[in-house]
Image: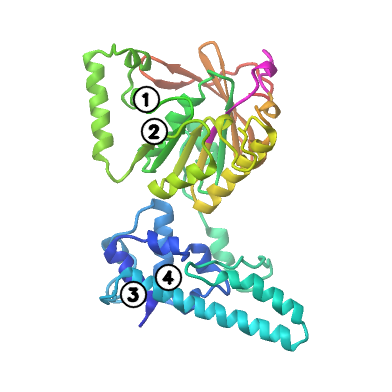
Amino acid sequence: MNVGRVLVSKILTGGNVIPVIDTGFTSTWLRGTGTGSEVIFADIDRQAYSWILNHWGKHHTTPSIEIFREHFPEEIYPLDTSSSSIEEIIDLALEKVNSYLMSEIIGKAIDLHDSGNVERAVAYLQAESMRIGTALRVKADRADNLGDVEFDLEEFISKEITPGVPMGLYPVDEAFFGFQPGQLITMLGRQKSGKTTLMLNSALKAWEEGYDVLFFSVEMDVELLRQRLYSLGAHVSPSRFRRGHLKDHDKDKVRKFHQRMSEDTDVNFYISKKKSMITVDDILTEIRLYRPHVVYIDGFNFMLDRETKKLTQNWEANENVAAELKTLALQEGIVIVTSAQVQEKQYHAKHGIEASTIMGGTGLLKASDLVIGGDKEGQYHTISCVLSRYEYFDNVVLEIDWDTMDFNIIEGMSINYDESGI
């Protein structure tokens, strides 16, 4: 039996790749050396499975057979009609991989033993035996050799990335090219500086671009968040909405927006019911449940560190949680956007608030790929690039019409903030 071919066939006919990925048959495993992937997938089966994983990574949906056929026609890739269940095929694949890994481990241990390195052989067996079990445990990738003659340089230099998750302000999105999977993005600002509005606007734009969204807020309940989100989507006043004073034509706008959200069942926007004292484990649980492309956490300062059992206003908890969020984004292949307060007492009328005064410590400054500052002076909001691992963007001055929730970018205007502040 060609296990790889059967596995690909079961994924396509069943429309669900998640059980296979959750088992450990990931892109990292497929690309790795010495992982056992070669005993399952070879030649065109490897190409087909790699394509399915890439489609999942980009769309978070299992491709249909029709879409698959656009790349792998019937004449070059007939599906296997085995009557076995996908669970049985996964078990068989695991058995073959684990048999391969066991043979490799025992062979290496024997070689060490026969060469007189008995202690190293024992240590190797103890360490590598953890890779064998009911779920696949992938051996860490070997270091990348820059002189590897098999490295596909042409593919590397020709690789293009597509625009990522939008922030929702075109100067920022054009300069930074959107938020990419694996990135941690932080929005900084004082209390009441508009962080939640900017995050909700970004989340809505992400949903409109076809990304599944999961939104956490430690300060607002689900009803209020719905009001704010519907106000943005329908372009009605959030103040009148909250007070129950929407006019009839505004209610019609909200109804149309809600209908639009409810009809687009392929793209989802989830608002978590978890509030303060959220841990990274809480976030991971809901990621596994809803499989979003992007997670928004409005209120990093109220997250709880599972190690110190303290909120992130404590410097050590701040460091731990920030590092875990970055790791989570990388491991799950998603974007994580969080907001954090800076210390009000450090605000300077001329220079704004320096990034180093973020409340609780500098964990997010170290872990984030992009730190966006937001401040408010009168009716104007200034959005600035505090830190970036990639491209920087120029300050953006924004005016929000709170009656229609239109975002108007004021070209050629600047507010007197020091470049190191926000």
SS class of the residue under badge 1?
A: helix
Instruction: Report how far apart the C-alphas of labels 4 and 2 lie in the structure.
Output: 35 Å
Q: Earlier in the sequence, mark 2 or mark 3?
A: 3
Name the residue carrying label 4. Answer: 47
Residue 225 percent coordinates (x, y): 39, 26
Numbered mark located on residue 204 in the image: 2
Residue 246 percent coordinates (x, y): 28, 14
Instruction: Report how far apart the C-alphas of labels 2 and 1 lie in the structure.
Output: 8 Å
Image marks 2 and 1: residues in contact by CB distance under 8 Å: yes
Numbered mark located on residue 232 in the image: 1
Between label 3 and label 1, give the one nearer the viewer.
Answer: 3
Q: Where the C terminus falls, by quadrant?
A: top right
Between label 3 and label 4, give the one nearer the viewer.
Answer: 3
Residue 393 percent coordinates (x, y): 59, 33
Number of residues whose C-alpha sits closer than 10 Å to that of mark 1, classed few (under 14), some (14–19) or many (20 or more):
many
Q: Where the N terminus falls, by quadrant?
A: bottom left
Q: Which residues are magenta?
A: 338-353
Q: Earlier in the sequence, mark 2 or mark 1?
A: 2
Instruction: Report how far apart the C-alphas of labels 3 and 4 lie in the structure.
Output: 14 Å
Image marks 4 and 2: residues in contact by CB distance under 8 Å: no
Number of residues whose C-alpha sits closer than 10 Å to that of mark 4, classed few (under 14), some (14–19) or many (20 or more):
few
Q: Earlier in the sequence, mark 4 or mark 1?
A: 4
Number of residues whose C-alpha sits closer than 10 Å to that of mark 3, classed few (under 14), some (14–19) or many (20 or more):
many
